[in-house]
Image (cartoon, rainbow, N blue to C red):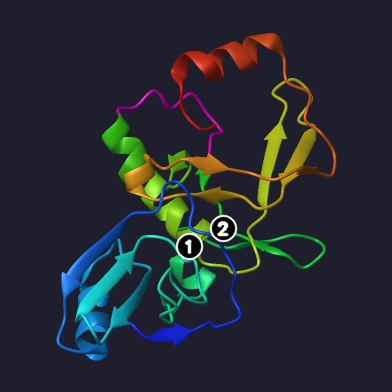
């Protein structure tokens, strides 16, 4: 079961990836139950006049196109969604590791593995579905922190991106990201070509 909350002041637009499912429900509670059972439902609105339950995979908030209030599925705490030990930076911010490579483990995996995750305690990818849940858990946006340690001299380089979001399975986990924040990582041509050839996120 899930809790739902009404956010009348929200004005987030429905994107091109949003999908609306319509079902018949006897009342608003029935509609909430239908949304709760669906892993793809993030919000719902209910029309008493037509007994129509409208469920969406995104969070537009506020009112729907017919002026009906939209109820958002209450988000879980980000820490509870993290599959790995949360890392705290020197300035007190907390990050959930989504991928780590420290040896020669093969990351050229099938799509199904990238969706659900793979690896061990040292080399791992937590999975696109898990990253979707993490990146959509905060109403204030999520920061993506990329850290790279050079093999030759063990120098740590980092780069941050604001407003990191991986959408759900219906969009094939499309990623959007905001402007770069902080120091840029200088990548060699060989590294860039390898990333493009493998066509994965790392």
195 displayed left or right of 120: right
Residue position for label 1:
82
Dot 2, how many residues are within 10 Å of its Cα: few (below 14), some (14-19), or many (20+)? some
Front one among 114 and 70: 70
Residue 101 falls inside the magenta stretch: yes
Give the structural element (helix, strand or loop) at label 2: loop
Residue position for label 2:
96
- Does residue 78 lie above or below 184 as drawn? below
x, y percentage for residue 165?
55, 51
x, y percentage for residue 146?
67, 41
x, y percentage for residue 112?
27, 36
x, y percentage for residue 69?
43, 82
177 displayed left or right of 23: right
The C terminus is located in which quarter?
top right
Q: Which mark is residue 38?
A: none
Residue occupying image coordinates x 57% and y 58%: 96
Front one among 26 and 78: 26
| Among the two numbered marks 1 and 2 on one chain, the one whose residue lies closer to the N terminus | 1
Q: Which residues are magenta?
A: 100-110
Residue occupying image coordinates x 30% and y 61%: 40
- Does residue 186 lie above or below 97 as drawn? above
């Amino acid at each position: 079961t899930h809790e739902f909350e009404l956010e009348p002041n929200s004005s987030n637009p429905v994107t091109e990836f949003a999908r609306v499912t319509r079902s018949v429900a006897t009342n608003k509670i029935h509609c909430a139950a239908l949304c709760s059972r669906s892993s793809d439902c993030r919000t719902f609105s209910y029309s008493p006049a037509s007994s129509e339950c409208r469920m969406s995979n995104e969070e537009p908030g506020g009112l729907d196109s017919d002026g009906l209030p939209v109820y958002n599925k209450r988000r879980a705490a980000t820490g509870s969604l993290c599959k790995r030990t949360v890392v705290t930076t020197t300035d007190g911010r907390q990050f959930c590791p989504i991928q780590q490579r420290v040896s020669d483990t093969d990351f050229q995996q099938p799509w199904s593995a990238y969706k659900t995750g793979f690896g061990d305690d040292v080399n791992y990818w937590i999975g696109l579905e898990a990253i979707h849940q993490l990146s959509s858990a905060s109403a204030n946006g999520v920061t993506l922190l990329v850290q790279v340690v050079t093999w030759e001299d063990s120098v740590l380089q980092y780069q941050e991106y604001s407003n990191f979001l991986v959408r759900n399975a219906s969009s094939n986990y499309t990623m959007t990201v905001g402007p770069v924040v902080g120091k840029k990582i200088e990548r060699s041509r060989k590294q860039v070509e390898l990333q493009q050839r493998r066509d994965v996120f790392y």
